[in-house]
Image: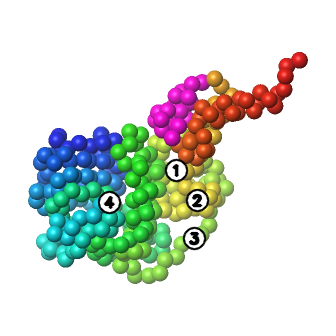
């Protein structure tokens, strides 16, 4: 927000109009808060905490047509929370944890929280939503219904799944954020979009040549710099169509495929070389050894060091004693 705010994790977010990013901002109670909060023209996830609330209401703006999705992580009394759209005060009650708002930025949303709060805000550009809606067979969605303090279990669960990654030193990959924006976008369209027709979309997977090309590109970009849009373009598909077809063909998302490929590559290096774990982590596409260890333990069930020791012991026994 300003030089007195204390952001954690992604301290220097990418601000390309095309590249999504996350950021975690912690106000210290003394930080001056601007009357206008401007989001970039891309998909973003911002966690904003304050121990003291806001001195005055703030207006949230976007340089492109977009939806603002806000979800509170803690409760607020009704007397300490207000929200306006188009200069009209919306009637609200107690803010319970994980209640969400969905407001079009065109309505110039304003809010005020007079006590400690913890919010996650998503900025979702309408261009991306239009592409998803077209691919799902809805056509372009002209309007979205206003929702304030909605008990939306899907948005709540999506937020719970992304929370552990906000504020970490290892930045969320753009491929993961692309996938995340598709999931959230599809839900927003079906739950809040004013739809003109019933959805229809193909249920098929990728053609054999598309599977080969997607696998090649993911292998060549193991560090995660490639976008879903790059993969989709190479396969001659829209982003939403590609993501859905990829999952049909492989059973997992592109981001999950890439993580599994990184782990398989790391296992190969651990079993066939004497490289250090930090070098293996970097060569396998992880930012550092901590991220590698955390991901390996989550998906394999043991630490990389323990896996390597177990492999060497088992391999040594299989070879038998040297005569």
For image coordinates 40% across by 82% down, the residue present is 196
Which element type, helix, strand or loop, lies under badge 3?
loop
For image coordinates 40% across by 74% down, the residue present is 191
> How far apart are labels 2 and 3 at the CA level?
13 Å
Determine whether label 2 and label 4 are within 8 Å by CB.
no
Q: Of the residues under marks 2 and 1, which one precedes in the sequence?
A: 2
- Residue designated by label 4: 73
Query: Quick check: 294 above or below 19?
Result: above
Which element type, helix, strand or loop, lies under badge 4?
loop
- Residue designated by label 3: 202
Determine whether label 2 and label 1 are within 8 Å by CB.
no
Q: Of the residues under marks 4 and 3, which one precedes in the sequence?
A: 4
Q: Which mark is residue 255?
A: 1
Q: Position of residue 68 (x, y in %)?
A: 29, 63
Mark 4 nearby-residue class (10 Å; few <14, some 14–19, many ≥20): many
What count of labels does the image hold?
4
Is residue 282 in the magenta section? yes
Q: Which mark is residue 247?
A: 2
Which region of the structure is painted magenta? 275-294
> How far apart are labels 2 and 4 at the CA level?
31 Å
């Amino acid at each position: 927000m300003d030089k007195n705010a204390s952001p954690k994790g992604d301290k220097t977010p990418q601000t390309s109009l095309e590249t999504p990013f996350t950021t975690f901002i912690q106000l210290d109670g003394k930080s001056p808060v601007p009357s206008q909060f401007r989001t970039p023209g891309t998909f973003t996830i911002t966690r904003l905490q304050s121990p003291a609330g806001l001195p005055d209401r703030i207006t949230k703006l976007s340089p492109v047509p977009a939806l603002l999705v806000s979800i509170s992580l803690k409760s607020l009394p009704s007397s300490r929370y207000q929200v306006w759209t188009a200069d009209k005060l919306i009637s609200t009650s107690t803010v319970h944890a994980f209640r969400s708002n969905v407001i079009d930025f065109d309505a110039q949303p304003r809010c005020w929280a007079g006590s400690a709060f913890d919010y996650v805000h998503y900025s979702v550009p309408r261009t991306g939503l239009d592409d998803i809606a077209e691919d799902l067979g809805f056509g372009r969605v002209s309007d979205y219904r206003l929702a304030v303090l909605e008990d939306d279990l899907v948005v709540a669960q999506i937020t719970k799944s992304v929370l552990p990654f906000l504020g970490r030193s290892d930045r969320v990959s753009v491929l993961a954020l692309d996938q995340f924006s598709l999931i959230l976008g599809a839900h927003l369209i079906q739950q809040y979009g004013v739809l003109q027709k019933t959805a229809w979309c193909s249920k098929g997977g990728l053609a054999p040549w598309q599977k080969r090309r997607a696998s090649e590109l993911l292998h060549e970009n193991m560090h995660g710099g490639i976008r879903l849009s790059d993969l989709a373009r190479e396969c001659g598909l829209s982003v939403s169509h590609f993501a859905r077809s990829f999952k049909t063909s492989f059973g997992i998302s592109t981001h999950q495929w890439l993580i599994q490929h990184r782990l398989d590559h790391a296992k190969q290096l651990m079993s066939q070389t004497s490289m250090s774990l930090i070098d293996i982590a970097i060569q396998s596409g992880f930012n550092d050894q901590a991220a590698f260890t955390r991901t390996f333990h989550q998906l394999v069930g043991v630490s990389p060091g323990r896996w390597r020791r177990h492999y060497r012991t088992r391999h040594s026994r299989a070879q038998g004693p040297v005569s």
